[in-house]
Image (tube, coloured by chain):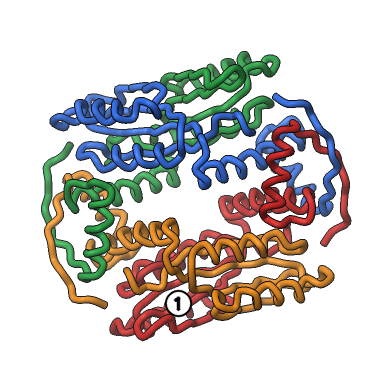
Chain colours: A blue, B red, C orange, D green
Amino acid sequence: MGKLFRFGVSLEKTLLDKFDKLIRSRNYTNRSEALRDLIRQELIKKEWREGKEIAGAITLIYDHHKRELVNKLTDIQHDFHDLIISTQHIHLDHDNCLEIIAVKGKSSEAQKLSDILKAIKGVKHTALSMSTTGKEV
Amino acid sequence: MGKLFRFGVSLEKTLLDKFDKLIRSRNYTNRSEALRDLIRQELIKKEWREGKEIAGAITLIYDHHKRELVNKLTDIQHDFHDLIISTQHIHLDHDNCLEIIAVKGKSSEAQKLSDILKAIKGVKHTALSMSTTGKEV
Amino acid sequence: MGKLFRFGVSLEKTLLDKFDKLIRSRNYTNRSEALRDLIRQELIKKEWREGKEIAGAITLIYDHHKRELVNKLTDIQHDFHDLIISTQHIHLDHDNCLEIIAVKGKSSEAQKLSDILKAIKGVKHTALSMSTTGKEV
Amino acid sequence: MGKLFRFGVSLEKTLLDKFDKLIRSRNYTNRSEALRDLIRQELIKKEWREGKEIAGAITLIYDHHKRELVNKLTDIQHDFHDLIISTQHIHLDHDNCLEIIAVKGKSSEAQKLSDILKAIKGVKHTALSMSTTGKEV
């Protein structure tokens, strides 16, 4: 966390009222905290678009009964061991697994791994959660 | 436009530097103007989610050679004449039309019209542009 | 429109039932038409990401009372006259205008114009509607 | 996994060529597998919108040095113990933590937890990954 810096912002009264209502409904403690979040959101979108170092999570849903699927998933994850930090596995029910892969590295690599996993037979869904290493925001 | 109201915001120095770089790259004249846009974006997302009165545009791409397509599109648009303000038509090439329908009304109605148009044979793509009446922001 | 080509698809019964329910609720005439739309959606996302020639619409909301705003908007649009096909203007109320700019060209140029317009003082919101020239889909 | 059901689909030749190119670039083994994924994506979006039972992940980035932050995060997570399955924690660097919370329950509850966590001082970013329990797809 860096040193705090203070500056003035001017808003139309009607816009400010709307904003205050929004941040109350989301339980923000003050306007600065809410504005910080809006700014960070925008910066993180930019980090991903520009191929910066990012952190994130790939969420997989699959049926572990599919032949050879678990082996395939493990092999592929090892090919990306530089990108992958760790993996969390949840047995959703008798058939379905939820696997969450924490990643840190280039946004293009994370996207590539997500695409490869998605195309595997038996993988029902992948979602790529785009977050940040926190260093720059 | 309402009266301007001024208040202080505090940001970590590193976050502020990043933000200043972002707003320079997007040609904003000052921080207030950039923050206003971030706030409005968030409020407009909320207007749509909560079913408020919105304004927007539905963009259609279609092949006008498809039998009965133009008649069907016209009929449906008349069913939504309360929602539709006006329509702009562009002949993209020999086959393809770009039609942009300006709408004002409930967000659910705009979504419904967009879904109906999308399902019509010959309509290749619809995109729903979610904007605002400007009254509340 | 090209010649039709037919091929077989196999789906799990449960997935097919869900899909049939979805397409009925959206009024599709048959499965092929719904699948075509899903495929086109995916291809058009790719066109935009890869910087292909696209068509689309930029939706602006602004307060025309802001000093010099209308002149500025006109000047900028002339700088992008190769990209812009035509413009549709709607007087939403006494203060607010809805302007919809139909564009055709490179996706990066459309994004750039949208960003420039958004940063102008008095422009309350811009939305970029990502569609297609229809040639490739 | 249910029984497989086979049906015919017809596509314009140009659209099919584009689609085949897309699925090759994403390493799908065949058209059916790619179409299944497009259908599932659409169904899962619907599950979230309609408030069905979903599974997913909430990704948090925060600075653990912020006073009381870790306690607050733990307290809140306990309030949502019915929704939360498990949590994975990664020390990104000296300051920043990546925490990934696996959730299963109503989409509105997952959204609510994500909003509450986001508003806490010291939490730099939250991302909500919208996936599925796999039961219906």
Question: Which residue shows up at 49% across the image and 36% down it?
Answer: D128
Q: Position of residue A82 (x, y in %)?
A: 38, 26
> Residue D112: image x %, image y %?
55, 33
> In the image, residue C25 lies at what x, y percent?
34, 58
Question: Which residue position is annotated with label 1?
Answer: B98
| In-image side of D68 versus B88 (left or right) | right
Residue A34 lies, with reference to residue A11, above or below; the image says above
Q: Nearer the viewer, residue B63 or C11?
A: B63
Nearer the observer, D80 or D65? D65
User: Between D66 and B30, which is closer to the camera in this rendering?
Assistant: B30
| In front of the other: C99 or C109 | C109
Residue found at x 30% / y 51%: D38
Horizontal arrangement in the rendering, residue B66 relative to residue B48 (left or right): left
Residue B84 locus on image (x, y percent): 55, 75
- A49 to the left or right of A29: left
Q: Residue at x 62, y 17 (%)?
A: D64
Q: Which residue is depicted at the point 61% across and 79% down?
A: C88
User: Quadrant where the C terminus of chain B lies?
Assistant: bottom right
Q: In the visual, does C106 lie left or right of C71?
A: left
Q: Secondary structure at mark 1?
A: strand
Where the N terminus of chain B falls, by quadrant?
bottom right
- Is the residue A5 above or below the residue A108 in the image? above
Count of numbered badges drawn on the protein: 1
What's under tag 1, amino acid-wise?
Leu
Circle 1 crowding by C-alpha within 10 Å: few under 14, some 14–19, many from 20? many
One can see residue D132 in this view: yes
Is B55 rendered above or below residue D57? below
Chain under disc 1: B
Q: Would residue B53 be seen by someone viewing this image from the given angle?
A: no
